[in-house]
Image (spheres, rainbow, N blue to C red):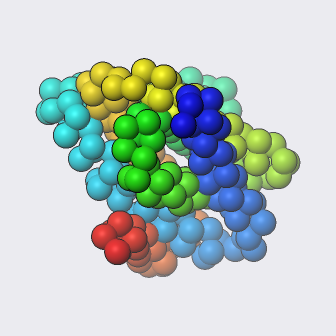
Amino acid sequence: MNELIIGVIGFLVGVVGTGLGAIFGIFIRKTDRILSFLLGLTSGFMMFIVSFHLFPEAFYLGGIPVVISGIAIGLFIIIALESIINRATQYANLKTGIILGISIAIHNFPEGLALGSTLVGVSDFGFVLTVAMLLHNIPEGISMSLPLSMNLLNPWKVLLFTVAAGAPTGLGAYLGAYLGNISANIISFCLALAGGIMLYIVCDDLIPMGKTLHKGRVSSVAVITGYVLGIILYFK
């Protein structure tokens, strides 16, 4: 399988997964209870992705110093971006969607690297990884599109922004296939950086937003449900 085909596969994995999530996030019936539940559900699922996929793989590839450095720099980047975006927009939902989109785009690139190098070297596992990555991009698309659509942006713009966040998977897959065995430390650092950013967004934006929309227990139950659902799907 040549590099161009692998790049196309990675691109489709990114944009189809996030696109499907965006469509669901845009067109569902939006009541405060439903939005609170979905924000909680995607928060829990994203915590699972960080806990069982991004951080373990980062630790395995690069070790503790690389991962801690990635997380620390990721936090610095996201706090700086948040400060800039806070000055640029008064809409909290829009801010959350933009920041989350940036974090998804950042973490899709190293995932594409991993996918591309796997498809070149271990084709049997590459198919499994391709399907798994496509499926886990769906809740990411939902979590990005919900805050943007809640701000009443044009649905086509929401879909375009969300799909764009999945596109770096294609570039990463192409480079991963072209370079073959790319530096494990680089992939580890990128995964840790993206994981730190995503974890910050979940804790600082998505979960508090869910609790603000609906004061009951719906959001908290949904967070746990999303986390456990991710574990079940992972180990099934």
Quarter-of-image position of residue 114: top left
Front-most of residues 98 and 137: 137
Q: Position of residue 201 (x, y in %)?
A: 45, 45
Residue 107 seen from this side: no
Residue 132 seen from this side: yes
Quadrant housing the N terminus? top right
Q: Position of residue 46 (x, y in %)?
A: 43, 56
Above or below, 105 against 16 in this view is above
Q: Position of residue 12 (x, y in %)?
A: 65, 45
Above or below, 233 against 159 in this view is below
Quarter-of-image position of residue 128: bottom left
Q: Residue at x 48, y 66 (%)?
A: 40
Quarter-of-image position of residue 225: bottom left
Above or below, 166 against 175 in this view is below
Q: Residue at x 78, y 66 (%)?
A: 27
- Left or right placement of residue 88 versus residue 171 in this view: right
How many numbered marks are there?
A: 0
Considering every residue shown, the one lying at the far front of the view is 1
Front-most of residues 24 and 11: 11
Q: Residue at x 33, y 26 (%)?
A: 181
Q: Position of residue 91 (x, y in %)?
A: 67, 42
- Left or right placement of residue 77 versus residue 82 in this view: left
- Left or right placement of residue 175 versus residue 54 in this view: right
Q: Residue at x 35, y 66 (%)?
A: 234
Quadrant housing the C terminus? bottom left
Above or below, 67 against 123 in this view is above
